[in-house]
């Protein structure tokens, strides 16, 4: 892996759930814009000002401090990820060009409210306090997952009693660590062996231990595990389905029904023609599809 990408992957592991980590990121004084290759608009624009800021263009707020696989910068500095690809596809389906407006995660909602972008696609969990100020179109789930070695898979079926007595590895102070500890307590309460929880906040070390059979399983966000499996060559596979899931959505200004409905319609079209499934699969997020 390139140095920059490795650094991003390590950040993803250390922070655990992306949304929780990003909430702590400091706001930047200014936003920067990123334009990258995107599919051509599919036809005439299906939405126009004042529902969007600029005729013919969908301005998408994205975090410049995001994590793989949703949205991040690759080793060349380009903005990439499943949300970037989906944002481009949604814009094209609406007959618009896409333009990404980058800021710190903590500033994306203020940036939308300041009318510097039309919609947020930024690993933004759908929570009641956010629904009070923006409208959401859900497009993917976030959750926790368990990975085992593809070559030497352990008999693990998910976050259940199959983990009793197993040796697992997690990053410190993450949701995965808390869930593993909770499961271990359930095991001992049932008279079964505790989960042998090991902690290491270095993704490359954790992955190597799983692949070598030194530990039975590796717990992290399901999207991060999917990314490792599809984009980095890690020989791991998911055990069971993601759990503890929460929806991520495209956020528009409260009351901007025209744009909200246009995005929802475009997403439904992408789901119907297979484009959505293709994007999710390419980024290892098929198990987190909003269609499941």
Image: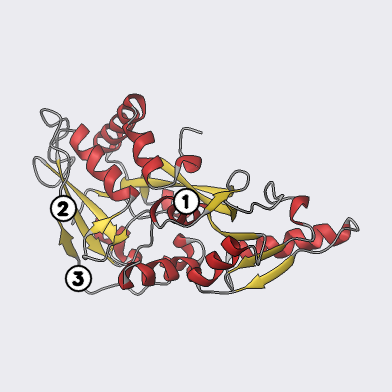
- Per the model, the C-alpha gap separating discs 3 and 1 is 32 Å
Q: Is residue 7 above or below residue 290?
A: below
Residue 89 percent coordinates (x, y): 24, 39
- Picture quadrant where residue 277 is located: top left
Q: Between marks 3 and 2, how big is the CA–CA gap?
A: 20 Å
Residue visible at 35% across and 49% down in the picture: 134
Other residues around mark 2 within 10 Å, as few (<14) / some (14–19) / many (≥20): few
The residue at which mark 1 appears reads as: 226
Name the front one of labels 3 and 2. 2
**Residue 82, horizontal then vertical, whole percent:** 34, 48
The residue closer to the viewer here, 65 or 214, is 214
- Picture mark count: 3
First in sequence, mark 2 or 1: give its number. 2
Check disc 2 and report the residue beneath it.
36
Closest to the camera, between mark 2 and mark 1, is: 1
Residue 96: percent from the left, percent from the top? 14, 38
- Residue highlighted by disc 3: 30
Question: In this view of the protein, which residue sits in the foreground, 165 or 253?
Answer: 165
| Mark closer to the chain start, 3 or 2 | 3
Q: Residue at x 80, y 62 (%)?
A: 185
Horizontal arrangement in the rendering, residue 43 relative to residue 250 (left or right): left
Q: Nearer the viewer, residue 233 or 261?
A: 233
């Amino acid at each position: 892996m390139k140095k920059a990408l490795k650094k991003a992957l390590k950040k993803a592991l250390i922070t655990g759930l992306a949304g929780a980590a990003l909430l702590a990121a400091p706001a930047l004084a200014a936003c920067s814009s990123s334009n990258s290759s995107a599919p051509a608009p599919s036809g005439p624009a299906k939405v126009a000002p004042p529902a969007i800021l600029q005729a013919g263009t969908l301005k998408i707020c994205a975090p410049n401090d995001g994590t793989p696989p949703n949205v991040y910068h690759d080793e060349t500095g380009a903005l990439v990820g499943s949300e970037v690809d989906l944002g481009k596809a949604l814009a094209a389906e609406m007959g618009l060009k896409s333009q990404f407006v980058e800021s710190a995660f903590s500033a994306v909602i203020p940036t939308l409210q300041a009318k510097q972008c039309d919609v947020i696609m930024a690993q933004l969990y759908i929570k009641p306090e956010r629904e009070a100020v923006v409208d959401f179109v859900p497009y993917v789930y976030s959750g926790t997952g368990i990975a085992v070695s593809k070559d030497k898979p352990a008999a693990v079926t998910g976050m259940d009693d199959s983990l009793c007595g197993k040796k697992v590895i997690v990053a410190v102070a993450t949701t995965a660590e808390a869930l593993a500890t909770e499961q271990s307590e359930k095991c001992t309460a049932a008279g079964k062996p505790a989960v042998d929880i090991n902690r290491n906040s270095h993704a490359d070390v954790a992955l190597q231990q799983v692949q070598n059979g030194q530990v039975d399983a590796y717990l992290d966000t399901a999207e991060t595990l999917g990314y490792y499996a599809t984009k980095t060559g890690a020989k791991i596979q998911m055990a069971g389905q993601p759990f503890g899931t929460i929806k991520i959505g495209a956020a528009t200004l409260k009351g901007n029904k025209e744009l909200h409905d246009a995005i929802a319609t475009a997403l439904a079209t992408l789901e119907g023609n297979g484009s959505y499934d293709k994007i999710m699969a390419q980024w290892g997020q098929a198990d987190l599809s909003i269609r499941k």
